[in-house]
Image (cartoon, helix red, strand yellow):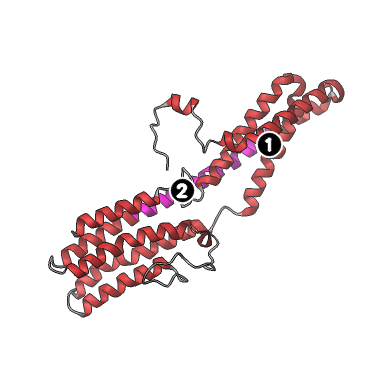
Amino acid sequence: MISYNPKDWLRFLFTLHRTDTVRQLFPLIIFIGFYSWGIVYLEANYLKLTQNSYAKNITTMHSLLGFAISMLLVFRTNTAYDRWWEGRKLWGALVNNSRNLAVKMNSILSREDEKNRSFFKKIIPLFASELCIHLQNEKTRLALDADPHPEIAGFDSSKHIPNQIVALMMNKVHLLHRDKHISDHQLLFLNHELQSFLDICGACERIKNTPIPYSYSAFIKKFIFFYVITLPLGFALSLGYLTIPVVIFIFYVLASLEIIAEEIEDPFGKDDNDLPMQKIAANIGKNIHDILT
């Protein structure tokens, strides 16, 4: 995730970051520019549509469709940002629950019980780091575990790794309860944090596995394209060759909103604007080490 100063206007205005939409849209911008030039040239010299009722009809159509497309893009960007923010809240909850479990185990386990303290010191941060790998894995996006997970000692890599980690934690807690290291009350005391790990994992998988419906995404792209393609017909004789930068700018704004929405709707990827899951997992590891040491 990019760290920045929101008050630094000059940086935003005059710096092109490698994720800037201009870089991604550059080939299409060139195409739209040449296309607009061709329409202006043909209409000025041959078509002359603006000399009859077609020009007024096209302008009216653009006004009506402009409102419709703006509403669609507002809904699209809001939906994408909601997914990004929900992902951030889930990882924030993971940080809190990991700390809470560590604090509770620290109060329950004696200082002399180094073996069990060391187990939780390693296993709690391991869940966060493995959840990060799990969410960035392509097979998770497709909800299919066809390919083996990278080998991890002690785990069956053909299965769901976060599930196995939580199962180990749960088994360890019940063994401690069986051996009278944890009372009945303390077992209930720990249950919420133990259960929360898979609740968070499932919620993250729901975001990862459920993109915006294909038909909706495809329709918006087609709508933007055909809307922009018809703009030069209405602007050609009224604006002349100024039609070219005007159409390019309108296309850039509309297409950029769609690209930004595409990037942030999956907050668990490796793009610059995705969640810094590795850093969050590293912070969890540091916090747990401080608590249980």
Q: What amino acid is labelled 2 in the image? A: Trp
Q: Which residues are magenta?
A: 64-93
Q: Quadrant of residue 118?
A: bottom left
Vertical arrangement, residue 280 with respect to residue 36, above or below: below
The answer to whether residue 174 is visible is yes
Element type where label 1 sits in the image: helix
Query: With 253 as the anchor, is 233 left or right in this view?
Result: right
Closer to the chain start, of discs 2 and 1, is 1
The residue drawn where x is 53% and y is 59% is 138
Q: Percent x, y for residue 59?
A: 73, 28
| Residue under pointer 2 | 84
Foreground disc of the pair 2, 1:
2
- Which residue is at the front of the view, 81 or 169? 169
Q: What amino acid is labelled 1 in the image? A: Leu
The C terminus appears in which quarter of the rendering? bottom left
Q: Is residue 96 magenta?
A: no
Q: Percent x, y for residue 12?
A: 47, 28
Q: Is residue 80 magenta?
A: yes
- Which residue is at the front of the view, 238 or 65? 238
| Residue under pointer 1 | 65
Q: Percent x, y for residue 11?
A: 44, 27
The N terminus appears in which quarter of the rendering? top left
What numbered label is drawn on residue 263?
none
The residue drawn where x is 57% and y is 52% is 212
- Which residue is at the front of the view, 201 or 157? 157
Element type where label 2 sits in the image: helix
Q: Main secondary structure of the magenta part?
A: helix
- Which residue is at the front of the view, 58 or 125? 125
